[in-house]
Image (tube, helix red, strand yellow):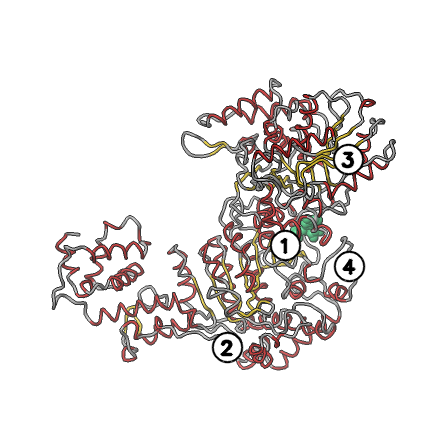
Amino acid sequence: MPDSEMQQLWSTSHLSGGNASYVEELYELYLHDPNSVAAEWRSYFDKLPQISGVGSDISHSTIREHFLSLAKNPRRPQAVSGGQVSSERDKKQVGVLRLIHAYRLRGHQASNLDPLGLWEREPIADLTLAEYGLTDADLDTVFRTGDLQIGKEEATLREILEALKSTYCGTIGAEYIHIVDSTQRAWFQQRLESVRGKPQQSAETRRHLLERLTAAEGLEKYLGTKYPGTKRFGVEGGESLIPMLDEIIQRSGSYGVNEVVLGMAHRGRLNVLVNTLGKNPRDLFDEFEGKKIIDLGSGDVKYHQGFSSNVMTSGGEVHLALSFNPSHLEIVSPVVEGSVRARQDRRKDATGDKVVPISIHGDAAFAGQGVVMETFQMSQTRAYKTGGTIHIVVNNQVGFTTSRQEDARSTEYCTDIAKMIQAPIFHVNGDDPEAVLFVTQLAVDYRMQFKRDVVIDLVCYRRRGHNEADEPSGTQPRMYAVINKHPTTREIYAKRLIEGGVLTEAQVQEQIEEYRNALDNGDHVVKSLVKEPDTNTFVDWKPYLGHQWTARHDTRFDLKTLQELANRLTSLPDGLVVQRQVAKIIEDRVKMAAGGLALNWGFAETMAYATLLHEGHPVRITGQDVGRGTFSHRHAVLHNQKGDGAYIPLANLYEGQPRFDIYDSLLSEEAVLAFEYGYATTTPNALVIWEAQFGDFANGAQVVIDQFITSGEHKWGRLCGLTMLLPHGYEGQGPEHSSARLERFLQLCAEQNIQVAVPTTPAQIYHLLRRQVIRPLRKPLVVLTPKSLLRHKLAVSSLEDLAEGSFQTIIPEIDAIEPEKVDRVIMCSGKVYYDLLEKRRAEELNNVAIVRIEQLYPFPEEDLAEALAPYTNVKKVVWCQEEPMNQGAWYCSQHHMRRVIGQHSVSNLYLDYAGREASAAPAGGYPSVHAEEQAKLLQDALYA
Ligand code: AMP
């Protein structure tokens, strides 16, 4: 723009008054609709190349900075009184367009969301005419509507205002202006404004809505009468959830979705089980009566139970799966995501068109729990995306007894966290089922079109206490005084339909009775339920049921094929230039494959994956830094040093091979491990691995370990073959990162729930990983993996060790020590073995045998007994560990060792301990102290 013209503009009263924000607003309007600003401004804005290059989405801050810099420019001409001023009419037009924007931005704050009418909201100046230089006298003036989607270019201010109020301040509070992508914003504007926030629903749809509400209310009433005072965490107050779910499923089906996976906490769960998934009410009643309906081990309460069924939709059969969940709120969401991703991978559904996740949350937990943020953060990453999740917050405005205001959160809405990923958020008054239906349709359509998360905040209330035995008025007197007088959603809607002539009183009554009769008869109450589901819609888990950990298996692999696979892995494509150290690793692997170099950990582990892929098993590995491996031993992802891109040899073994997925995870443990649990519990034929950067980080996911991994099978009958690789070992690096807290895992072991292994050779990790998939048993596997051992000269194996053999739960003495001369046997696990071995060799002790326990759980008592049997002159048996006495395997595994020793041919054997003193921290902070302690424990083990 020529300087003279610019100066001309800057000499106007708007700018000389320092009114940069006014210009900024004008600019925003111009962006929405260039014709909405005066021609003078349009041409000015048209000529802003010096700050363009940003496209039409130029940010406010950029424009603000620009204007501010102009304002600060000392060469700026002084105001000239009587200079050009926009006409009054232009100003008003601008005001109208700003008003439209304000309603889009803040209309939700003036919307009618609370069914109880208890919200005290401040009046919003931004939504007043006065704020924009407009008055009631302008109401009948015709203005341009800009990009307001009401089907006309001009309308009176009155009409514009009515449209805005109806769209943005009714029973829907729409938040989408925070979305940066203008296509998405325009999409919402079009959808919301074109129907003024209230599309007309057909009589049939309205009857159906009432029928679903009748079902929701009917079940709770029935259970309340039949089992008074029994906990059921009823949906009462949030009944609209049921028609909402119905719509999501049916509409998803019409898009061709094949599976919908749901996660939810206890509130309303029984209702969803019966009224959405079609669980037989009779089974639910049996549970209320305390009967064990399936033999699952310890079992779980009824409001944690999962369920699967198939329903018919206009697009065909849809498989529904409700995930089992613990009482820990929100943790099931990433589990659902993992399950969905597994199903999408199985269906080769890279876009998320075939499988849709629904996450149902409570308001307090959604605002309070950190895992919500972690799960949102995962939603568009390569490893974890699922094409968008439909989130529903059953917002009953209270968290147990904690009130929404003041205590439960610092954000305005419980859903504000979703803005971190720019998810659109629809708050909706739960007492307006038609509004609920509308936002549900929007949410599904948005998810299917944009493949991003969307949130529905179903603002409702909780008719009873936290559970049915709880009296809520003690803590929420005001709220419950209102609730006690408040008609149910069904009553309100039935009245509306009767008044609208859609149904008669008698027909409403008929709906109620029909539902009650169905329950009396113990009939299914989901009309669309498919009685004989298409079994192709889900995985057959039968081959994995009923196996012991001792199940026979064969992890050997043909040597020639193994070498051929290794050669393929090390033949890199032309143009790939790898970094020097990586090239050395690959060169070494070439030698290892040819038998010219002893095999190290990285090679053996890689070959476990390659051979499993060759045998038809997909492999998925995620975790922090898994591509390279925290200690650079893996290098499964090769980054091109010349140019972009990375090459993954294991994903390029041969045409048509099973999936090999390896992804560095976001820096989360809780949500990521939960995701992988969900993935593994849905994919029995794959090797699914989560690796911690350092083993001690696993406790960031302790909820997942306690609530799912170690107990899921016993509570819910859900098998899980997830493998956790946890680097562990005392290397003098301080209290962090030395310990994966082995003791914690061992303390959780019972009833063969998980496997805990501490392999010490490359061949051991190879056979262990292969065993995890080849053996039909599906149990979580916790592996304490090494750090320095990855490159230890003694921790090597041969090609034959991979081709032959199997995972050894116990590795007996390897040196040629005569058993009769042995008077001391040391048992140990992990890296300390090599320290003991080296010292014993150096000191030429031929009276000491060292036995490695490579699997600590299930404890291999028989194998240990066999390894100890030759030592008929033994006098002392020592357990040696690096960990302090209160940690490691000592307390949790000694009873197994004692039992074995007690049966030894030498009687009265005592089990000694050699290790660090009990300690609060896992390890000391000073290398010198570490070395001293390490030397002492080795000395104790060998001599004391
Ligand atoms: P879903 O697709 O999750 O509904 O699973 C379909 C069916 O497979 C379920 O009804 C279960 O019988 C079975 N199933 C799914 N996951 C598991 C699992 N992790 N362990 C055992 N059985 C499972």
Q: Which mark is residue 293?
A: 4
Mark 2, other Cα within 10 Å: few <14 / some 14–19 / many ≥20: few
| 534 w.r.t. 268: above or below | above
- Residue 174 horizontal side relative to residue 522, left or right: left
User: Is the CB of mark 1 within 8 Å of ligand 1?
Assistant: yes
Looking at the rendered structure, the kind of residue marked 3 is Arg
Specify which label sits upstream in the sequence, 2 or 4: 2
* 883 vs 111, nearest the viewer: 883
- Looking at the picture, how far across and down is residue 303, in whole percent? 68, 62
Viewer-nearest of labels 3 and 2?
2
| 873 w.r.t. 169: above or below | above
Q: Would you say the residues marked 3 and 2 are in contact, meaning their CB atoms lie under 8 Å apart?
A: no
Specify which label sits upstream in the sequence, 2 or 1: 2
* 696 vs 64, nearest the viewer: 696
- Residue 787, visible in the rendered structure: yes
Q: Disc 1 versus disc 4: distance between alpha carbons?
A: 23 Å
Q: Would you say the residues marked 1 and 3 are in contact, meaning their CB atoms lie under 8 Å apart?
A: no
Looking at the rendered structure, the kind of residue marked 2 is Gly
Q: Disc 3 versus disc 4: distance between alpha carbons?
A: 31 Å
Viewer-nearest of labels 2 and 4?
2
Q: Disc 2 versus disc 1: distance between alpha carbons?
A: 39 Å
- Looking at the picture, how far across and down is residue 403, in whole percent? 55, 70
* 835 vs 917, nearest the viewer: 917
Looking at the rendered structure, the kind of residue marked 1 is His
Quadrant of the image occupied by residue 926 = top right
Specify which label sits upstream in the sequence, 3 or 4: 4
Looking at the rendered structure, the secondary structure element under dot 2 is: loop
Question: Residue beneath label 3, please?
Answer: 552
Specify which label sits upstream in the sequence, 3 or 2: 2
Question: Residue beneath label 2, please?
Answer: 117
Mark 1, other Cα within 10 Å: few <14 / some 14–19 / many ≥20: many
